[in-house]
């Protein structure tokens, strides 16, 4: 039995308790100040307010003031925090990080490093560690198609754990692997993280094809699958330019996660309303009014700026990413979606 | 202006008239004995009975007895015939095949060669040519995500033309390329054809995940995207074992066509009713009663037997294709779908 602390009690943090409890571990779920209502509901045996399902009763719960009790002597800490808040919350966890500890992260996105360049999230976490701890702490990034709620009812699921130290990935895998929650491991952290962040951006494009259908009253399956193909191709270019490999792109983090993200969810929905006729400005204003955050929106800007950064460093040519550029033009320059996506497909085949 | 003869007036044959007419070519559409009603409707300016849309009025139409007039002096002949009938119909076209001619084929599937081994369709066509013509006639295979009806309303579409002679593929591309119908070319005929045939098989598996949803009242997105990822992985193994490359697998014929086939259509529907609780025997009987043909059903047997043939020749290990084997067990041995697919995912990650 291992002691596992999950930092963040949102949908994914709470769902990961299921395989851990199934494997008989001690599971401590800590809620941030935004999760107080969640922790209270779970303590009363009520459904989780986010996904409306109960989590296993064996889970130990901790409110925001109880971080020390939650994190002390953990064998594994899993950061289940949105990408924007990840660094801030990790700083609060730092006092409880001990040499030899393994830290998992399920956040998906990019961040700015100290020099202003865009970096992947495990590198952000590592940069926050005190220098003496850096060689002693190993990070494991989680990628692949995994809707949190489906973990709760034990849907057959396949994900990828990536760590520079394969033994760290294997250790985390051993703690979480069940009959239904299946895990592959890789040392390609860069490729895994690049896919995890970028698929949200590309899913907005897939949603646009659904929006064209609604607006024009005809299906655009051909267009959607062409964009899907290009999205994978561009993820490959970006992963390679960053120093990653093709393997995560053609596995769970790339193909798999793009498939699930393109089927449903908020990223696709944002694309849908734009494809359906709203300008991006109108769509974003509408979402902000409804207090809906869509990861794909900042991911498109991060991705495009990352591509420009890689081009500046001679690692990528911008003509390798016409779809990402087209998405940037639609989302941040109010370019017309149908014309832009048609032009992307023509660029690829000219 | 080129003279292009389309053999077969079904959904795809009739839809390909659109880019050809848009480019100002002379287009001759010949109907088999099964297409008489179609040709009559088109001649009267009525909608095509299959897809209920009108095709361009400039298309010249020919009934089954008018093959000579249809095929004489064609610059390009496009075979748009179901895979089962392809060889039989091509034999009737043979007298009109002249040296230097280019023959395109949009059929997707496998067939048995003269030695009883499974072969790809362009090889079937080539084997039917008189020996003296073989060096003189070039074949172009069409792969990629292309719903026929979407060609009619000029949806942005991307496909792949594959020929051992890249100039033949480029010639056919030049005749058909429009602003909306976009074409990449490759010399990898084997990989393109393997994907084209196998995606129908794997789409049945994706449909099963949709069926689980209906039966259990919960989504199985994680399962579907894991199966999607494995399908691409197995197409890669099979393409390489056959002597093809990875490129079509990771392009339109593989990723792209699997995406569109998994979204809708009869292959997915077959999987859905089985995932929803019917045994394969029941599902097949039901479809036969309704006179519905599903390409994925024979494709699963062809694919699995092809894998065994490749294993016999030392080119593939059967453990590389657990999903295809699982699909064979469900479709041809009445194995239970949910258990089998769960077991496939475990095999991959054990």
Image (cartoon, coloured by chain):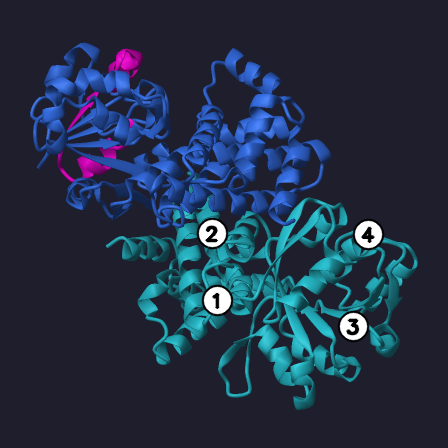
Chain colours: A cyan, B blue
Say which chain tag 4 marks.
A
Residue at 53 percent across and 49 percent down: it is A259
Q: Tag 4's secondary structure?
A: helix
Examine the rendering and report whether any part of residue B153 can be seen: no
Tell me if B321 is positioned left or right of A343 in this view.
right
Q: Are marks 2 and 1 in contact (CB under 8 Å)?
A: no
**Viewer-side residue, B322 vs B78:** B322
Q: For the stretch drawn in magenta, what is the main secondary structure?
A: helix
Question: Counting residues from the N terminus, which is met first, the one under dot 1 or under dot 3?
Answer: 3
Q: Is residue A172 above or below residue A314?
A: above
Q: Are marks 4 and 3 on the same chain?
A: yes
Q: Are marks 1 and 3 in contact (CB under 8 Å)?
A: no
Residue, disc 4: A22
Residue, disc 2: A206
Disc 1 from disc 4: Cα separation:
37 Å
Q: Are marks 1 and 4 on the same chain?
A: yes
Question: Counting residues from the N terminus, which is met first, the one under dot 4 or under dot 3?
Answer: 4
Disc 2 from disc 1: Cα separation:
13 Å
Disc 3 from disc 2: Cα separation:
33 Å
Residue, disc 1: A300
Q: Are marks 4 and 2 in contact (CB under 8 Å)?
A: no
Is residue A147 one of those drawn in magenta?
Answer: no
């Amino acid at each position: 039995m291992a002691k596992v602390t999950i930092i963040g009690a949102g949908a994914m943090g709470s769902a990961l308790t299921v395989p851990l409890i199934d494997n008989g571990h001690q599971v401590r779920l800590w809620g941030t100040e935004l999760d107080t209502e969640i922790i209270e509901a779970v303590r009363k045996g009520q459904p989780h307010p986010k996904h409306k399902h109960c989590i296993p009763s064996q889970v130990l719960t901790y409110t925001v003031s109880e971080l020390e009790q939650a994190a002390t002597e953990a064998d594994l800490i899993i950061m289940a925090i949105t990408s924007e808040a990840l660094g801030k919350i990790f700083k609060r966890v730092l006092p409880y990080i001990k040499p030899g500890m393994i830290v998992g992260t399920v956040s998906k996105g990019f961040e700015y490093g100290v020099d202003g360049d865009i970096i992947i999230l495990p590198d952000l976490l590592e940069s926050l560690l005190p220098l003496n701890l850096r060689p002693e702490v190993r990070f494991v990034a989680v990628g692949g198609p995994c809707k949190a709620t489906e973990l709760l009812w034990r849907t057959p699921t396949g994900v990828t754990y990536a760590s520079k130290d394969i033994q760290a990935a294997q250790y985390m895998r051993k703690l979480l692997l069940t009959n239904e929650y299946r895990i592959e491991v890789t040392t390609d952290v860069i490729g895994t993280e690049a896919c995890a962040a970028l698929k949200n951006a590309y899913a907005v494009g897939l949603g646009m094809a659904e929006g064209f259908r609604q607006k024009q009253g005809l299906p655009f399956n051909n267009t959607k699958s062409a964009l899907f193909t290009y999205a994978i191709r561009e993820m490959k270019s970006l992963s390679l330019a960053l120093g990653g490999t093709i393997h995560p792109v053609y596995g769970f983090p790339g193909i798999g996660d793009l498939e699930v993200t393109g089927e449903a969810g908020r990223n696709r929905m944002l694309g849908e309303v734009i494809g359906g006729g709203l300008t991006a400005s109108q769509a974003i204003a509408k979402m902000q009014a409804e207090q809906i955050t869509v990861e794909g929106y900042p991911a498109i800007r991060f991705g495009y700026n990352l591509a420009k950064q890689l081009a500046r460093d001679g690692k990528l040519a911008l003509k390798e990413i016409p779809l990402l550029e087209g998405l940037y033009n639609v989302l941040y320059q109010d370019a017309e979606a149908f014309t832009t996506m048609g032009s992307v497909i023509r660029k690829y085949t000219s």
